[in-house]
Image (cartoon, helix red, strand yellow):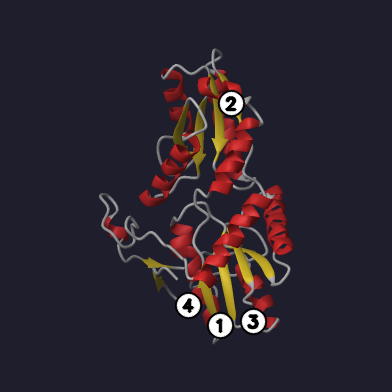
Amino acid sequence: MNPLLVVGHGTTSDEGVAQFGRLVGEVGRLAPYADVVGGFLELAPPPIQDGVAGLVAAGHRTIDVVPLVLVAAGHSKGDIPAALAREKLRHPGLSFRYGRPLGPHPLLLAEAEARLAAVVRRELWPETAVVLVGRGATDPDANAEVAKTARLLQEGRRIGTVETSFVSLAEPGVPAALERARRLGYRRIVVLPWLLFAGVLPDRIVAQAAEWAALQPEVEVLTAGLLGPTEGLARVVLERWAELDGGDLRMNCDTCAYRVALPGFEAKVGAPQTPHDHPDDPAHAHGHGHGSHDHVHL
């Protein structure tokens, strides 16, 4: 059986790095029949190149890859495929099978529901607003996935409202979404990060929520936990991996900014993709880069 490389974005947070490691360990525990390793795109070790090198040294010539991202944005569409293309140059004859992002999977929605239940009793949900906070991207398709997630979380759970927001690169931001919930009449608001692990962005969400709450003492603002390295998340990774064997790999290209001229993003169509720099693996002219690679869905 092919080995699995789980690719995370990377973070400067030691706790975030440790959580990623625990998630990879949990995937390996659930799949003892195959080699499972992890690697980061940037910002932290171990880099992708180390994971690939270890698997190649173990005799593998085809590696399955699951990007540990919730939505399909620039990292999953361009940066990771470009980094894998670089590894194919390093290891001639090596091939990859590339899985799709995690998405608003029911198991992850259940994890988000559990985070909400940890801070507000279920009988209070109809009078509670939730502000779901995604990472945010310059990719409209990715931002739309967060809006879809918010609606899926609201459906059937008797939550008063679930408002979509983003912590970076897209609007509305956290304060704007909190203000909208307040104007809708809610006096209890839960800020729910749609993020996996600890890092700079989750810390920013907490700070922004606290700053807004300090100016609105009549509103109770609570912050829920992150999705975290749970068994549920590990099982979603396994499902994305299994799709590679089952031939059930569904990639959404209908609203991909690299393929379709979306209003305001026309310049992205066919734009070249290049690997990210990593401190241990420079990707550009000053290091070991091999040029650019056109965007493809592997």
Q: CB atoms at circles 2 and 1 under 8 Å apart?
A: no
Q: Secondary structure at mark 1?
A: loop
Residue 120 x/y as whole percent = 62, 25
Near mark 1 (Cα within 10 A), the count class, few <14, some 14-19 or many ≥20, is some
C-beta proximity under 8 Å, tags 3 and 4: no
Few, some or many residues within 10 Å of mark 2 (<14, 14–19, 20+): some
Q: For marks 2 and 1, give the one nearer the viewer.
A: 1
Discs 2/4, front = 2
Name the N-terminal-most of marks 1 and 4: 1
Q: CA distance from mark 1 to mark 3?
A: 8 Å
Q: Which residue is mark 3?
A: 60
Which mark's residue is nearer the viewer, 3 or 4?
3
Q: CA distance from mark 3 to mark 4?
A: 23 Å
Q: Amino acid at mark 3?
A: His
User: What is the three-letter code of the residue carrying label 1?
Assistant: Leu
Task: Work out whether mark 2 precedes mark 4 in sequence or the reverse, and give the earlier one.
Answer: 2
Whole-Å distance between the Cαs marked 1 and 4? 16 Å
State the residue in front, 270 or 108.
Answer: 108
Q: Which mark is residue 210?
A: 2
Q: Can the viewer see residue 230 in this picture?
A: yes
Choose between 122 and 56: the one closer to the eye.
122
Do we see residue 224 in this rendering? no
The quarter of the rendered structure image containing the C terminus is: bottom left
What residue is pinned by disc 1?
Answer: 94
Residue 33, numbered label: none
Question: How busy is the neighbourhood of tag 3: few (under 14 within 10 Å), some, or many (20 plus)?
Answer: some
Tag 3 secondary structure: loop
User: Which is more N-terminal, label 1 or label 2?
Assistant: 1
